[in-house]
């Protein structure tokens, strides 16, 4: 997910919202950073200090081209390190490729059993990272890595196409147009990663703020499995249903188009997903450093 320069929220215009993002940036810069910033605005003061102290040790990760000393850098670290190689030319972090998503078919009953076999899915890794952070005996380097993974993976889980799909690589195989904008290789996944995420985040009041306790409690309620099911349902009932103009499990055309009316209708959903990610990450960080 990724390849677009991060845009400052105050400077984004409707034209800028049409800038393309490849599967490596966009949501996975602007979106991930926003999720992380919401979290830091809503954790307990002691948690905020603990997170900052641990990120100050991120040099132990030995990834100087992917700094993680700030919450923003930490939020995108897991994507940034994907191209890094060992001295033998092999991927340093190839083992984590499947940790960014979970292929749960939206047209079958919800279950994580197959998608999370052997812990190789995003929700399983969120649970694992939380446990590593809670354990005071976890070595510092492992705690730092668990923290940056956790920050990123909670964002991933709340991009619906990381939680549900229909045999199309999370929408990456679905050619798509965003209004009249249809560059080569644009697909449904990149729309939710980039143009739609940016528009959602920059529509209305800033999402980065201190939320009332009641709002936080309501949104952050439930477990990682509950959040997985919810995001999967958004993928089915909103992402695919809007793209296919009805039945999300119907045949997928050669190319789908999200017209302006559809975009306006789903922007609040995309916005809520970012908000959910931020407040749920805040909950997990408070648990990790409590």
Image (spheres, helix red, strand yellow):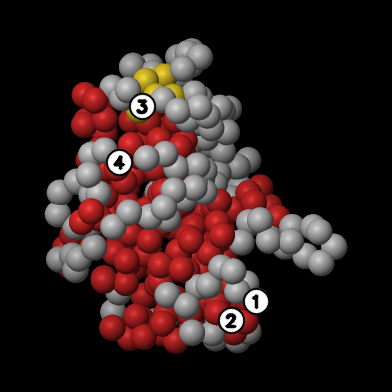
Q: Nearer the viewer, mark 2 or mark 3?
A: 3
Label 1's element? loop
Mark in front: 1 vs 4 = 4
Look at 50% across and 27% down and name the residue there: 184
Q: Residues within 10 Å of mark 1 (few under 14, many from 20)?
A: few
Callout 3 touching callout 1 (CB < 8 Å)? no
**Disc with the residue nearer the chain's start (3 vs 1):** 1
Q: CA distance from mark 2 to mark 3?
A: 41 Å
> Which residue was labeled with disc 4?
17
**Rendered location of residue 24, percent (x, y):** 52, 48
The quarter of the displayed image where residue 269 is located: top left
Question: Of marks 4 and 2, which one's residue comes earlier in the chain?
Answer: 4
Q: Are marks 2 and 1 in contact (CB under 8 Å)?
A: yes
What residue is disc 3 on? 181
Query: Residue under circle 1?
Result: 62
Give the CA separation, mark 4 to mark 2.
34 Å
Indicate the secondary structure of the residue bearing disc 3. Answer: loop
Residue where numbered disc 2 is placed: 59
Please provide percent x and percent y for residue 37: 32, 66
Residue 156 image offset from top left, x and y in percent = 46, 51
Q: Is residue 106 left or right of residue 43?
A: right
- Using residue 41 as the reference point, say whether residue 174 is left or right of it: right
How far apart in space, not on screen, are marks 1 and 4 (Cα)?
34 Å
Work out which quarter of the rendered image holds the C terminus and state it: bottom left
Q: Using the numbered discs, state the Cα–Cα distance from disc 2 to disc 1 in whole angstroms.
A: 6 Å
């Amino acid at each position: 997910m990724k390849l677009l320069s991060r845009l400052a929220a105050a400077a984004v215009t409707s034209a800028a919202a049409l800038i393309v993002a490849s599967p490596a940036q966009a949501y996975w810069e602007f979106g991930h950073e926003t999720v992380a910033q919401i979290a830091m605005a809503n954790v307990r003061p002691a948690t905020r200090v603990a997170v900052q102290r641990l990120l100050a040790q991120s040099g132990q990760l030995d990834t100087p081209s992917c700094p993680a000393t700030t919450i923003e850098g930490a939020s995108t670290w897991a994507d940034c390190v994907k191209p890094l190689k060992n001295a033998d030319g092999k991927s340093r972090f190839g083992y984590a490729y499947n940790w960014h998503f979970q292929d749960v078919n939206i047209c079958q009953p919800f279950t994580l059993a197959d998608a999370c076999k052997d812990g190789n899915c995003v929700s399983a890794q969120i649970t694992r990272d939380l446990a590593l952070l809670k354990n005071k005996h976890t070595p510092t380097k492992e705690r730092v890595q668990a923290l940056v993974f956790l920050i990123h993976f909670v964002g991933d889980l709340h991009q619906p196409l990381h939680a549900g799909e229909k045999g199309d690589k999370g929408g990456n195989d679905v050619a798509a147009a965003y209004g009249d904008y249809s560059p080569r290789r644009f697909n449904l996944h990149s729309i939710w990663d980039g143009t739609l995420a940016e528009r959602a985040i920059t529509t209305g009041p800033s999402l980065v703020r201190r939320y009332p306790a009641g709002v936080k409690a309501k949104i952050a309620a439930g477990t990682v499995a509950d959040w997985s099911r919810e995001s999967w349902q958004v993928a089915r009932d909103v992402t695919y249903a809007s793209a296919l103009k009805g039945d999300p499990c119907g045949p997928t055309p050669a190319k789908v188009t999200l017209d302006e009316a559809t975009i306006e209708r789903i922007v609040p959903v995309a916005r809520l997903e970012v908000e959910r990610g931020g407040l749920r990450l805040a909950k997990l960080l408070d648990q990790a450093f409590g």
